[in-house]
Amino acid sequence: MHMNEMNVALTELIDKRNHLATLSYSDTKYDELEEVLHELEDDFLDEYGEYMDKVLTQVHEKNFPESDVLSPIAYLAKKYAVKNTHPDGTVEYNIPAKDGVWVEAYAYPNKDIRLILLANPPRLVMHFDKGIQKEVWNADKDHVVS
């Protein structure tokens, strides 16, 4: 698996989602940009969907066995806020607490936890209601962590 290419595709998806989030539904560019975003999502799924399904299944089995595995696109936030831009151009993101897929984690009973797909590098993080994040998969390491 070419993680660099996957990261580029994921970053492009995030950029388009962020751009779409700045437009109102009445904006003449909204429908056009939404169509471009859907095409990028389809391309991402065609290229990386099978791999990400396997990763998500492993993550769910290890950390969230009672929660259903959804399409990899479902794990993207609606909007990502730029937290930091590094000298090499990579971007760190903040995510709203209510974005991502709600999961039930036995290790954290009575906690509102969302599972979110991030870029730079591609990774899945548990996002707790108070903004705390815990990584459960990282493409650079290519293994599921708990």
Image (spheres, helix red, strand yellow):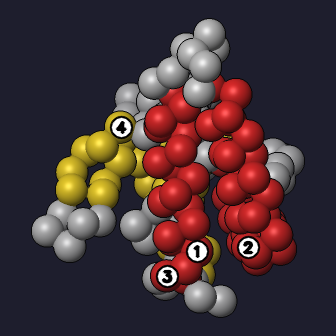
87 and 74: which is toward the camera: 87
Residue on which the image places disc 2: 48
Answer whether labels 1 and 2 touch (C-beta < 8 Å).
Answer: yes
Q: Position of residue 99 (x, y in %)?
A: 57, 32
Kindly identify the residue that appears in the image at 59 percent across and 27 percent down: 29
Verify CB contact (< 8 Å) between mark 4 and mark 3. no
What distance separates the C-alpha of mark 1 from that of mark 2?
7 Å
Mark 1 lies on residue:
6
Dot 1 falls on a residue whose secondary structure is helix
Point out residue 56 in the picture as x, y percentages from the top left corner: 74, 64
The amino acid type of the residue labelled 2 equals Tyr
Q: What amino acid is found at the position of numbered circle 1 in the picture?
A: Met
The answer to whether any part of residue 124 appears in the image is yes
Spatial separation of the CA atoms under disc 1 and disc 3: 5 Å
The residue tagged 3 is: 4
Which disc, if any, is residue 81? 4
Horizontal side of 99 relative to 84 (left or right) equals right
Tell me the SS state at disc 2. Answer: helix
Mark 3 in CB contact with mark 2 (< 8 angstroms): no
Contact, mark 1 vs mark 3 (Cβ under 8 Å): yes
Q: Which is more N-terminal, label 3 or label 4?
A: 3
Please, what is the three-letter code of the amino acid marked with disc 3? Asn
Q: Secondary structure at mark 3?
A: helix
